[in-house]
Amino acid sequence: MASLLRKSIFDTDWPAWPAWSTLRSPFDRNDGLIDMLEDTAIRVEEFELDKNFVIRAEVPGIDPDKDVDLSMSDGVLRLMVHRQKESRATDARHYRSEFRYGSFTRLLVLPAGASEDDIKATYEGGILEVRVPMNGAKAKEKRIAIAKR
């Protein structure tokens, strides 16, 4: 049976390019924007455990005594890390370096009930862990009236 549609020479079936199939919009999922910025961002995990809000940050190759500034203000934890470039061989011919050097800052909004007292931080194996005690308070919900004009 013949087709009722006429085929043009321009109607070609393009091959499925693997490179195109892996590309995605940076906004096609919730963490897309973070994926775009991950080269400069400090990667973290956040979870609640034993009445503590735990933040684990991936910051390998630093000295926590010299290179980390950790502070909290108004329910926001500020983590600033400075990684300096080491010069090991002056006569080395460099081809590529994917290591990140410089200052990196991450601001993390803590949940309702997070206490600013007795925060503890430890560093082991390239992971900075911050434990923030939770006092059990829940976020207050307030209904906002909408005025008609």
Image (cartoon, rainbow, N blue to C red):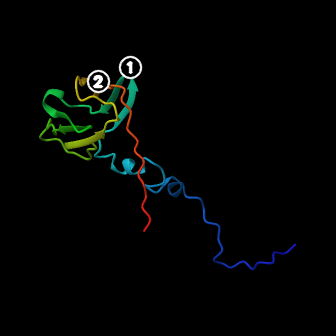
> Which residue is depicted at the point 75% across and 80% down?
6
Residue 12 locus on image (x, y percent): 65, 71
Picture layout, residue 37 above or below residue 6: above
Name the mark nearer the viewer: 1 or 2: 1
Q: Say which label, 1 or 2, has the lower sequence index.
A: 1
Query: Which label was assigned to residue 95?
Result: none
Residue 134 locus on image (x, y percent): 33, 26
Q: Quadrant of residue 60?
A: top left
Instruction: Compute the Cα span from label 1 to label 2.
Output: 22 Å
Residue 17 locus on image (x, y percent): 55, 58
> Which residue is depicted at the point 42% across and 50% down?
32
Question: For mark 2, what is the residue?
Answer: 125
> Which residue is depicted at the point 22% across and 45% down?
94
Picture layout, residue 50 above or below residue 14: above
- Left or right, residue 22 beside residue 11: left
Identify the image quadrant of the N terminus: bottom right
> Which residue is depicted at the point 38% across and 19% down?
50
The residue type indicated by label 1 comes to Asp
Identify the image quadrant of the C terminus: bottom left
Query: Which label was assigned to residue 50?
Result: 1
Picture layout, residue 23 above or below residue 13: above
Of residue 120 and residue 134, the one placed in the foreground of this image is 134
The residue type indicated by label 2 comes to Gly
